[in-house]
Every structure is written in C-alpha cells, then in structure tokens.
Amino acid sequence: MSIHDWTRVDAGIHLLIVDLFPPSPRDPQGIHRAIWGDDCGESFLMPADKPLTCVACIGGAGAEAFIEPVAVGDELPDMPLFLTPEVYVPVPLEAAYQLAWDGMPSYWRDVLTGD
C-alpha cells in the first residue's frame, strides 16, 4: 500500500506538504513519489541537488501537484493551500518560519545553532 492509497487525493482532498527530511529507503524519490506512486510518471525524478520537497496538491479526479524542490539553506517558497480546485490561500512559508524563529527565546536559538 502506498501513501497515495490513504491520502485520498483522488477523493478530492487537497494537501500542502512541506517535507524537509531527506529521502530515505522508505521513500527514495521523496514524499511526492511516495504519495502519488506511479501517477508521477515514469520519468519523474527529484533533482539530486534539491532533495527536499514542498508540494501543493489539488485533489479530485483530475488531481494536480505543484512541486517546489528545495535544499538545506534555500529560502522556503510561498505555496498555495487549495480550498477548491480554483481557490487557494497563499502560504508564505519562509516568512512564517522567520517569525517563529524570531519569536523563539535566544537560549533555544543558541542551542539549535550551537552558539
């Protein structure tokens, strides 16, 4: 059973996935291929230099995916969160991350950065 079997993208469930973990033996081509399976197409490959994934999915019979490959150190892209196949809310991932980081106590920022 692939993740696609339980995400129900084909049933009209819209997804916004931000997968900042590198591919593993469980998902060697990343989360997008794990979710979509063979529906990605035989030639779908994530770029080797950008193995992390931000993907917005429009669910339904004509499901679509908008993929933004990223790498560690890249600025996160703004992504759409679909409410319907035609209507979405823009999600400013980098700005949201920076606000969360700036609001974190300096002690924990130092722990995370090794300062």
Image (cartoon, helix red, strand yellow):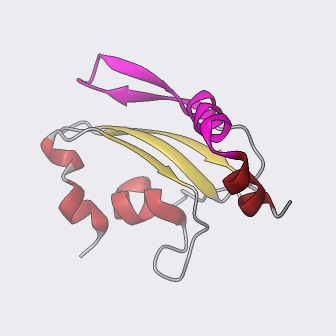
Residue at 52%, 64% in the rendered image: 30
Tell me, yes or no, if residue 90 can be seen here.
yes
Height in image: 26 above or below 88? below
- Total tally of numbered discs in the picture: 0
* Image spot of residue 62 (x, y percent): 25, 36
Residue at 25%, 25% in the rendered image: 83
- On whether residue 114 falls in the magenta region, the answer is no
- Image quadrant holding the N terminus, namely bottom left
- Image quadrant holding the C terminus, namely bottom right
Residue extending farthest to the bottom is 25
Residue at 18%, 52% in the rendered image: 8
The foreground one among 62 and 51 is: 51
Residue extending farthest to the right is 115
**30 left or right of 94 in image:** left
* Image spot of residue 7 (x, y percent): 23, 56
The foreground one among 15 and 86 is: 15
Quadrant in the picture for residue 113: bottom right
Height in image: 105 above or below 7? above
Quadrant in the picture for residue 89: top left
- On whether residue 84 falls in the magenta region, the answer is yes
**18 left or right of 11 in image:** right
Extent of the magenta region: 77-105
Residue at 77%, 56% in the rendered image: 110
The foreground one among 61 and 7 is: 7
**111 left or right of 60 in image:** right
Residue extending farthest to the top is 87
Tell me, yes or no, if residue 48 can be seen here.
no
* Image spot of residue 95 (x, y percent): 62, 28
